Image (cartoon, grey):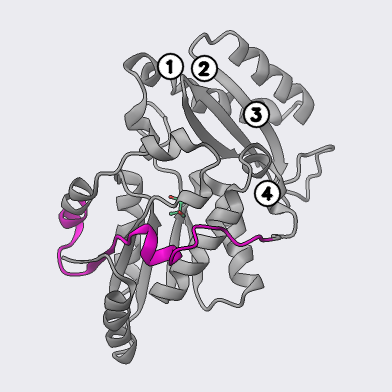
Amino acid sequence: MKIFHNKSELSHLIDDFKANNSTIGFVPTMGALHDGHLSLVEKGLSENAIVVVSIFVNPTQFDNQEDLVKYPRTLETDVKLLKTVSNDKIVVYAPTVEDIYEGKVQSQSFKFDGLENEMEGAFRDGHFDGVGTIVKRLFEIVRPNRAYFGEKDFQQLQIIKKLVELYHIPVEVIGCPIHRAEDGLAMSSRNTRLTADHRIAAPFIYKTLNSAKTKFGTKSAKKVTEWVEKQFSKQPLLELEYFIIADTETLKPVKRKSTKKTYRAFIAVYAGDIRLIDNIALN
Ligand code: PAF
């Protein structure tokens, strides 16, 4: 498996693939890979000649320094896992901060038609400027035909689709279903940092999302939200940061339901000091 830490070396390989008209799939990650990431890589391999997997803990998208410092960095294990999928059709790009930011670790400021102001944007200062900056940079370096993102970060997925539209980036952005553990917990690199007790408590998040979905069939968004807040107030190990039912397109909170629109429920929860997010389609 080819592993690059340097964009100019990767670029030569990409040039060769482009010269042969080989299609390039791209799975950007921050490492600590799990089955969710592997399913994106597998989908990428089924649709492209090769898949580039970037592994880079992007400093500019963290609003919390402690979270950045403690974010798991497990390159060796990540590479081993990727080899179980394919040894010759996956290329790893694991750059240094310097290779990406060239001495200026700063994000660009973006407007994504207001998508950046909702939910994660409201609760994590500058997060989507950091995500926009790194994903745009990675798209310029990797020049993929298709890029794969998990729907767990649904808002991120919508924002990246908007980024591609606004900057006319020639890549197809493909959203992939959330990968869950058997007990329903959405897979996340952060799950490895949960204590045993928090790990046992965490599936309550998805269980509650499912009940909220059922309730949304007959009740208003306000009533469902109040119900969810009440359920979490009874959970000693989980602290609800937000539960929001939003329009799938605009991500704005729903005021009055319309049969012509689709909605999704979004949730962010602290399990100890680990922040978990999840979401579910409601109709
Ligand atoms: O979803 C992630 O892991 C990150 O936000 C991404 C897209 C790799 C950018 O750093």
Mark 3 Cα-neighbour bin, 10 Å: few <14, some 14–19, many ≥20: some
Q: Which circle, 4 or 3, is nearer the viewer? A: 3
How far apart are the alpha carbons under marks 4 and 1? 28 Å
Would you say residue 97 sits in the magenta stretch? yes
Residue under numbered circle 2:
238
Residue under numbered circle 1:
201
Q: Which circle, 1 or 2, is nearer the viewer? A: 2
Report the span colored magenta.
81-110
Residue name at image x 66 percent, y 71 percent: 166
Residue under numbered circle 4:
248
Residue name at image x 23 percent, y 50 percent: 75
Where residue 13 sits, quadrant-wise, is bottom left
How far apart are the alpha carbons under marks 4 and 3? 17 Å
Residue name at image x 21 percent, y 69 percent: 89
How far apart are the alpha carbons under marks 1 and 2? 7 Å
Residue 17 vertical placement versus 43 (above, below): below
Q: Which circle, 3 or 1, is nearer the viewer? A: 3
Considering only order in the chain, which callout, 4 or 2, is on the residue closer to the N terminus?
A: 2
Identified by mark 2, the residue type is Leu
Residue under numbered circle 3:
242
Residue 69 image offset from top left, x and y in percent: 39, 38
Mark 2 Cα-neighbour bin, 10 Å: few <14, some 14–19, many ≥20: many
Considering only order in the chain, which callout, 2 or 1, is on the residue closer to the N terminus?
A: 1
In this picture, residue 276 sits left or right of residue 194: right
Q: Are marks 1 and 2 in contact (CB under 8 Å)?
A: yes
Circle number at residue 141: none
